[in-house]
Image: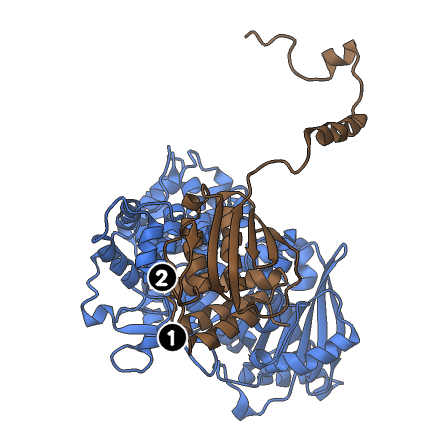
Chain colours: A blue, B brown
Amino acid sequence: MEVQLRNPNVIMKLSRLGSFHQSKLSFLRSFLKEFKDWEYKRDLFDINEFGYGVAIYSFKKDQRVYSLICFANELNEDERSDRVIATKWDAAFTLYDGVPKKHDIERLKNEVPKQEVGRLSYKELTLSRANKSLRLFNHVVDCLSEGNQPDLNLLLKVGYLYRTTAVYGSGKFGLADRFRIKNRKEIYGPFRLEMMLVYLVRQFTFDQVNHVAKNKNPKKAVNLDLEICRNLGIGNSTGLGMAPFIVNHPTLLNNWIYARETALKKIREIKNVKNKDQNLFKKYLKKSLKNITSWNTESEYQQKKIKSLLSDLHLFIDFIENKFDFSDEYAFNNIYLWLEKNTRDECIEYIVSMMMEPYDDIINPLVNKMSSEEEKYFTIPTNRTVIELKEILENKYSKILNIDFSKNENNQNFWFISKNKEEPRLADRFLDNGSELEQPLAIARDIKKLYNKLSVFKNTLTIDRFLAKCPEFRHVVRRAFIVEKFPYSEIQDNTIGKSIVPIDMLRLKLSFFGALKFDPRSDKWLRICMFQGAPLPQQLKNYDDQWVYN
Amino acid sequence: MKSLSEIETVSKRSTRAAGYSWGIAEEVGKNIRMLEMFGLPGIKNLNHYFKVKKKKKFENLSLINNENKNDILEFCPIIAGLSFLDQSRSLENLNLIKFEKIAYPLLFLPFISRASEVIGKKIQLKIDNKIFLLNYNHSLYSNSSEEGIIEVGNDVLINFKENKDSFEEKEWKELYKFSEETFVEEDEKSKLNSAGAGLTDND
């Protein structure tokens, strides 16, 4: 039986993309898999009694070394901010390509803590900063220094000691361009080095908290229990900066979603599900509920989603336990069809992620296909004709062509780049200034305009002649020819409408990162947790790939 | 040192700020990245062009012919280049294309380089006495090591190179002969045993 890939018109709606969950395809899980055989080392820990100084951690294999350099600095309480406008942080980090020499560390000591206003070089691969979850950090120091372990309930509520507020790569602020490293086998998957940075930062937070506690009370202090460490992750606070990324990298977006859709299709096509695979699916499904019941958020929007997810999951578990026979042919296809009929987006996508758990043989080959060479598809095939372009628009943007952009509500917002931080922002077109400097992120509106414009040209006209007359449509003409080849490259929604929920765009990206516990703080930024439950570096050689559910 | 990613982003944004559409700005971003990667002064020329463009008018050449000239204004290198790239498939039959007075012709060059990739032929670009051989957008050869600003190319010639060998058949045969020295002479037995295929294919 052949199952069709799911329809992009359904899957690429923002509400559906904003319901995605981590899976076996997620980048932090594939990062751990790739680097589990590498030699991990703490090369330097020059940190004073208060936890300030320099530390270096590395992963090494054969001749290749990646070194995380950490700079921990004193920060006044009133200077601590997760917002992008902050200029100081508790700690700043860079991932260095190789083994840094003394003069590299001296150079980076001046630049890395400055973040966006510092200058990095082609030897640095990623850059980040993080703030302490001060209440928790201090609590852990106090407990450890008295020889006690911290309050587990408090730890579980927050989930991390530090929260990063940005992770930069790919040429930002002078960092190495991707072309310099893209052919390294170990970083074929997207965001591998960003994941490495975050993972090593997590270890630094444990070492730092132990060190401060030890210095506070050398005689009594104990180290944070390894099992507790394993159950802590790294927080991340993310704003709109991430949203345009998925619009600006259409073939990359396609490859992420296409991998997920291909995995689902192949799993639905399994005729006879083996006992061990169905047991694994059921086991981890039940274990995963812990991640939902411990998912804390004050966001009403997210609370509603969690509530509906939990109730749908209970319904689903009852279904597979009592009314479903896994020995029927195409069991996972039957499950999927049942989900579509009986549950909502959050639950459908949750179970899609869970279905992947037993199937290394399906997932592993897909992981390395999730990168993209955007440049290859940049040049517009200008020998094509107006009628061909119209057909692409009618086939690939059918829902978008129905949006009425003469209504204010469909035109409510605009995206712009702020002058002070060069970061993307969203504003109200009818209330705020700056819409004349709008970024080209209103794809749905511009596609519709293009479609209307094409109707006044002859069908046989070639695209080069059309673009000579209408250069203002060049960016969307390019996209249309990309979506023709890459069905999941375009968000099938209006990114400037009144009802847009920008965090849906963030959540899509973060789910592919492998984030858990999305905690929206408004409709424009959210907090997440990464690597919670992940093996510690010294446990990597032999770890359980399903650590997410332990 | 600026990364190529920074170079692309700033070039794209400044092109938009100079009044071009976002789609054209995206093209220029990629082009300046390419120039800088090839060691040519893309940023310098783009910056200078945009400063001059504020005070001076340029002609937008949207349809490329055998001979392209304008008696009054210099051609905008971005629009002329884009037109050439977009129309390159229909232009390759013209052996030689001439332009008179293209402003800041280094900004025109990357479009021609990309056209070389699109049509699968090497292209020779002559800007007055400077010659550039553009190889399918993978590399370029030049007789000048240009580091400065070229404000105008008075005579710009484009010549599509046919896909043909750069050597004589005799030279090929001589070299081939050398390569044969890596082969093993076969005897009757190895002819039968070493090839792997069946002895008859009449199935």
The quadrant in which residue A239 appears is: bottom left
Q: Which residue is mark 1?
A: A416
Q: Which residue is mark 2?
A: A310
Mark 2 element type = helix
Residue B33 x/y as whole percent: 55, 63
- Residue at the spot 44% in from the left edge and 50% down from the top edge: A260
Chain for mark 2? A
Query: In the rendered structure, which amino acid carries the disc numbered 1?
Result: Phe
Place of residue A446 in the rendered image (x, y in percent of width and height, measured from the top left): 29, 62
| Quarter of the rendering occupied by the N terminus of chain A | top left
Q: Are marks 2 and 1 on the same chain?
A: yes
- Mark 1: which secondary structure? strand
- Toward the viewer: A246 or B125? B125
Residue A329 vertical placement versus A84 (above, below): above
For the point 74% across and 80% down, the residue is A106
Residue A269, compared with residue A287, is above or below; it is above
The residue at 79%/12% (across/down) is: B187
Residue B200's x, y, as percent?
Answer: 62, 7
Question: Residue flagged by tag 2: what amino acid is it?
Answer: Leu
Tell whether B180 sits left or right of A246.
right
Q: Residues within 10 Å of mark 1 (few under 14, many from 20)?
A: many
In the visual, does A36 lie left or right of A161? right
Say which of B107 and A410 sits in front: B107
Q: Are marks 2 and 1 in contact (CB under 8 Å)?
A: no
